Amino acid sequence: MLLIYCPYCQEERPELEFAHAGEAHIARPTNMADISDEEFETFFFIRSNPKGLAYERWRHVHGCGCFFNAVRDTVSDKFLATYKTGEPKPDIDSLTKKGDGK
Amino acid sequence: MVETAAMILPHEGNAAGTGVVTITPAAFASRLSIRARAEAVAPLSRALGVKLPDAPKTSAKSRNGKRTALWLGPDEWLVIDEAGADLMAPCAKVKQLHAAVDISHRNVALIVSGKGAEAALKAGCPQNLSLEAFPVGACSRTMLGKVEVVLVRDDAETFRVEHWRSFSDYVFGFLAEAIRDPVI
Ligand SMILES: [Zn+2]
């Protein structure tokens, strides 16, 4: 069973309680009516989908109900870090050096 | 002849047990779902006579022990009153912004009790339910089989399994099946 650390529940909880919610840190344009179709397409549809470390939104939907962000390795499925919504991206270099994520 | 319709309540007649665990429907209780920001937590706690806990996975009881407030999320609580008291009226007096919804009829509960209670729930709940990880008074929204439930540990060998009434047949069937396992 894959365990995911929820930053709101402050403990590791089973994967079954969580839902993936897409790429994290995508800012909604503040001038939505002014942007071109191409710019809208980029914001709305285009995702980085990296092989390796990805910043993702997750939701503890069958737990505390909160959305939070995670750094996950899409190759190994390993979570390097999870952090509360609104907190800055953690530094990937320090995460990979430290080895394990909490 | 006058025809009358009899209402069949969820879990009516549902009971199951073995030598080590029993499953019984909980008596009617009133229930309240609360969403509130930090500034409303203390006034709501005062109005309801029970502290809305701020630590994850914890619950608190009123002085008479009949009312329990469960932490579900950082801004979400479930209040259960086993005496069936009106929980909306005290909240209506609270001036701070909050959302209180009476869900007395949305939820029902089963009491799973006995030496085999923890094992019975583990048949379908992925959480660590050992006494160290899930002590007496601990509570959590989680999964049981395919449905969402709220678990409360009333004592070392007794759990309250709160769930939506439309899932009642599934939850009872799941647990009744689980306790037939010889390892439980
Ligand atoms: Zn959580």
Image (cartoon, helix red, strand yellow):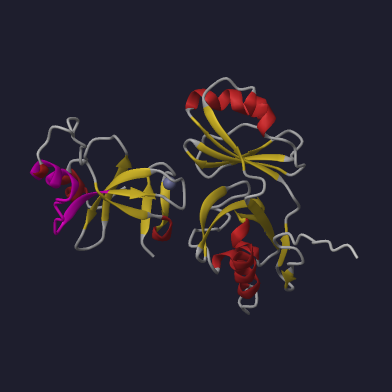
- Which residue appears farthest toward the bottom when viewing the image? B182
Which region is colored magenta?
A38-56
x and y percentages locating residue B171 in the rendered image: 61, 65
- Which residue appears farthest toward the front when viewing the image? B1
Above or below, comparing residue A66 to residue B50 in the picture: below
Residue at image coords 50%, 23%: B39
Foreground of the two, A83 or B79? B79
Above or below, comparing residue A77 to residue B80 in the picture: below
Q: Quadrant of residue A31?
A: top left
x and y percentages locating residue A4 in the rendered image: 36, 54
- Can residue B49 be seen here? The reply is no
Left or right, residue B145 beside residue B154: left
Left or right, residue A6 beside residue A100: right
Residue at image coords 53%, 67%: B124
Residue at image coords 57%, 24%: B42
- Which residue appears farthest toward the top when viewing the image? B95
Tell me if residue B123 is in the magenta stretch.
no
Foreground of the two, B50 or B40? B40
**Looking at the figure, which quarter contains the C terminus of chain B?**
bottom right
Foreground of the two, B9 or B47? B9
x and y percentages locating residue B23 in the rendered image: 70, 65
Left or right, residue B176 beside residue A37: right
Tell me if residue A51 is in the magenta stretch.
yes
Above or below, comparing residue B131 to residue B46 in the picture: below
x and y percentages locating residue B132 in the rendered image: 55, 53
> What is the number of callouts on the image?
0
- Can residue A65 be seen here? The reply is yes
Q: Quadrant of residue B15?
A: bottom right
**Looking at the figure, which quarter contains the N terminus of chain B?**
bottom right
